[in-house]
Image (cartoon, rainbow, N blue to C red):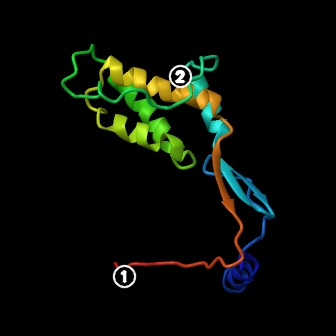
Amino acid sequence: MVKKFKEDMMKTFEMTDLGLMHYFLGIEITQEEEGTFISQKKYTETLLKIFKMEGCKTVSTPLENTKAFKKEYDSPKANESQFQSMIGSLLYLTATRPDIVYAVSLLLRFMQNPSQVHHGAAKRIVRYLQGTKNYGIWYRVTHDSKLIGYTDSD
């Protein structure tokens, strides 16, 4: 299916076949006969360095207790720009890490007025990533796959 699509595109457009893709927009791609694996290990390692957490102790879950995540929670304020930077970086990682989507989306609610509790929860996600750098998404090859595209007239 992909081969036929590529041939049709090359007939219509001027293109060069560069072979299998290995890296795209910070996403590492490993293509094998059984399927395709996408991950962001390098990005995760960079994120750990940026936030100075390379040697941090790992945790087994990205989120602990959500009861403390109330806007009126009485906790000292966190550095807003640092928190926003951390959450933005984690949000980009959710493209290949569905295991952190819930935790990141929960913390997105506090981008404007984060407390130390929220910042600690964001750091916990980073600690979780330290132990799960190799995680990603595996797309298994199926022989009945169909390429479908949708468009809007606007």
- Closest to the camera, between mark 2 and mark 1, is 2
Q: Residue furthest top?
A: 76
Q: Which mark is on residue 51?
A: 2
Which residue is pictured at 21% across the width and 16% down the height? 74
Q: Quadrant of residue 13?
A: bottom right
Closer to us: 144 or 148: 144
Residue at the location (25% across, 27% down)?
A: 113
Please state which amino acid type lies under the numbered disc 1: Ser
Q: Quadrant of the C terminus?
A: bottom left
Can I make out residue 27 in this image? no
Q: Nearer the viewer, residue 6 or 35?
A: 35
**Location of residue 15 in the rendering, given as x and y in whole percent from the top left corner:** 72, 74
Residue 93: percent from left, percent from top: 53, 42
Instruction: Give the mark nearest the N terminus, 2 or 1.
Output: 2
Question: Which image quarter is the N terminus in?
Answer: bottom right
Q: Which mark is residue 114?
A: none
Mark 2 residue type: Phe
Residue that label 1 marks: 153
Q: Is residue 36 above or below residue 148?
A: above
Query: Residue at point 76% right, 78% down?
Result: 3
